[in-house]
Image (tube, rainbow, N blue to C red):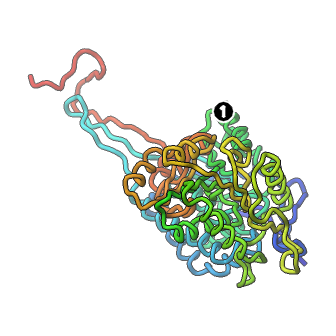
């Protein structure tokens, strides 16, 4: 019989106040029930907030280097449990173990990086304009951080948000995607084993009801959300009205540009990984392939031949290259977009249907799909599909490729394949994205660099690297006047010149 899991609130594993649960099933085999999880509501969130506020008062008083030590122990535990976490994540989310091991490794890297930041939450000391006076700043925590995470990186994205928030001294309430609740359950167990005080971390499972309650709660001053642009827009409206600090990481329509001088074999490896890795379910996935007309036909044939040989199946099967989509609605969305693309005039080069056979009959599988002859204005070239669908666009120059890349509402990731160093640096400068790769695919961000995009991909904040620590902390400025007299700044008695 499948296990029934609980929320973690106020230092205890507890049932939801609603009494409702939801099922978590293997997307590669829907007969495989992983467990039942609480369908939480506003009362559960309120209880979590009350506990987190107590946890915050405790945790903020712990020196930042000591907070970092807890995260270092978390990293050690993630190393110890890497393989079992990866395999259970494959069962829960569907992507192959090579990818879920990478997911855990991102968590490990983020933990160790966060541990070092406990000794590097730098402030500034600057000269005062007045004599016998010091002027300085330091970074301090904000309060309770509400984290809402998606399904596609069940461990990595929660750690991107959680570890910096904790090192900065905040308490955390996390609501993971209802598609992958088990992985975050395991992560919370590891945090507690590492010595994190129980009320510093709260885990609230559930769907939109719990997420809305977390965003709406007046005692949660900090929200970090990764998910769809539509949901992010609604969260942004609430947080703007309530004056909350908000980080949004939303959609992408990422393009890989292949110039006529590119190493086509290298570009082939890149587009296969970028478009069909994680079954296209990455915000950085290569969903557009922009190819110079001189190599277009040859390269499309290469991609179609290679993508056609990718093997679909359960991720835990060693022969599998591409796993399932996360659920039925996701597959139906992909099917609708493939139909829309053909109705708009695109040519179906490969795929465009569900697979057949024993290996895939119980899961949400869809064949890698390529649509050529795509025009920049088509919906399949403009809208995020979040599945194994690649739209191919033909261009005649680098300048045209830049215009096509930039002509969408998103701006997360881009890639350019070329041997021309001048074009490489122009791409870095001119492509309107938060991330640009040269001779590498659109996926593959590293944990110690900022991650995020422009336009409707987000709201300007970054995950990862050094910048995220600025999001999870506030700058406090202090002035120490030891002159023994009243000194008045910002009026017409500037004391900086010699007397």
Residue situated in front as seen by the camera: 491 or 378? 378
Residue 142 in view:
no
Asked whether 484 or 370 is in front, the reply is 370
Residue 340 image point, x, y percent: 81, 48
Residue 461 sits in quarter = top right
Q: What residue is shown at x 68% (from left), y 66% (from top)? A: 276
Count of labels shown?
1
Residue lying farthest to the left in this orientation: 499
What percent of the width, then of the height, locates residue 132?
Answer: 20, 33
Q: In terms of secondary structure, where does tag 1 sit?
A: helix
Could you tell whether 482 is left or right of 218 in the image? left
Is 10 above or below relative to 493?
Answer: below
Q: Quadrant of the C terminus?
A: top left
Q: Quadrant of the N terminus?
A: bottom right
Q: Which residue: 81% across, 73% down? A: 28
Q: Is residue 468 visible?
A: yes
- Residue sitting at x 63%, y 77%: 98
Q: Is residue 326 above or below residue 42?
A: below
The residue that disc 1 covers is 242
Q: Residue furthest top?
A: 492
Decide which of 261, 357 is in the foreground and name it.
261
Q: Which of 45/100 is in front?
A: 100
Q: Is residue 318 above or below residue 25?
A: below
Q: Position of residue 6 (x, y in %)?
A: 80, 65
Q: Residue at x 67, y 80 (%)?
A: 84
Decide if residue 287 is on the left or right side of residue 44: left
Horizontal arrangement in the rendering, residue 280 relative to residue 116 (left or right): right
Please rate how many residues cluster around mark 1, counting C-alpha atoms within 10 Å: few if below 14, some from 14 to 19, many from 20.
some
């Amino acid at each position: 019989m499948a296990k029934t899991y609980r929320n973690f609130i106020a230092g205890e594993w507890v049932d939801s106040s609603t009494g409702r649960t939801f099922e978590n099933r293997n997307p590669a085999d829907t007969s495989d029930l992983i467990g039942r999880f609480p369908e939480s509501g506003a009362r559960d969130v309120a209880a979590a907030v009350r506990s987190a506020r107590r946890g915050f008062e405790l945790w903020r008083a712990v020196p930042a280097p000591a907070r970092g030590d807890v995260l270092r122990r978390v990293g050690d535990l993630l190393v110890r449990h890497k393989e079992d976490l990866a395999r259970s994540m494959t069962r829960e989310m569907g992507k192959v173990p090579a990818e879920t091991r990478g997911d855990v490794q991102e968590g490990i890297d983020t933990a160790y990086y966060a541990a070092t930041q406990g000794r590097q939450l730098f402030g500034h000391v600057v000269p005062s304009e007045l004599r016998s006076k010091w002027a300085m700043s330091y970074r301090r925590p904000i309060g309770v951080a509400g984290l809402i995470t998606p399904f596609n990186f069940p461990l990595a994205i929660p750690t991107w948000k959680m570890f910096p928030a904790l090192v900065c001294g905040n308490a955390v309430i996390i609501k993971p995607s209802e598609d992958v609740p088990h992985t975050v359950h395991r992560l919370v167990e590891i945090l507690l084993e590492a010595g994190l005080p129980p009320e510093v971390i709260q885990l609230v499972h559930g769907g939109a009801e719990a997420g809305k309650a977390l965003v709406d709660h007046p005692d949660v001053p900090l929200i970090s959300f990764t998910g769809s642009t539509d949901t992010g827009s609604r969260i942004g409206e609430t947080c703007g009205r309530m004056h909350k600090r908000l980080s949004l990481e939303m959609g992408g329509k990422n393009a890989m540009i292949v110039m006529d001088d590119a190493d086509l074999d290298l570009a082939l490896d890149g587009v296969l990984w970028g478009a069909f890795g994680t079954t296209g379910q990455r915000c950085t996935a290569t969903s557009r392939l922009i190819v110079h007309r001189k190599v277009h036909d040859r390269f499309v044939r290469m991609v179609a031949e290679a993508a056609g040989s990718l093997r679909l199946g359960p991720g835990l099967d060693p022969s599998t290259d591409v796993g399932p989509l996360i659920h039925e609605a996701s597959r139906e969305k992909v099917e609708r977009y493939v139909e829309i693309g053909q109705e708009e005039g695109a040519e179906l080069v490969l795929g465009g249907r569900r697979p057949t056979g024993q290996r895939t009959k119980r899961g949400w599988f869809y064949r890698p799909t390529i649509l050529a002859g795509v025009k920049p204005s088509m919906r399949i070239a403009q809208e995020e599909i979040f599945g194994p669908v690649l739209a191919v666009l033909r261009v005649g120059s680098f300048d045209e490729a830049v215009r096509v890349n930039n002509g969408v509402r998103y701006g997360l990731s881009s890639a350019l394949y070329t041997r021309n160093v001048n074009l490489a640096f122009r791409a870095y400068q001119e492509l309107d994205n938060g991330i640009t790769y040269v001779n590498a695919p659109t996926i593959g961000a590293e944990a110690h660099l900022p991650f995020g995009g422009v336009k409707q991909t987000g709201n300007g904040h970054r995950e990862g690297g050094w910048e995220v620590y600025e999001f999870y902390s506030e700058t406090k400025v202090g002035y120490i006047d030891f002159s023994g007299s009243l000194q008045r700044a910002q009026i017409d008695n500037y004391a900086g010149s010699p007397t």
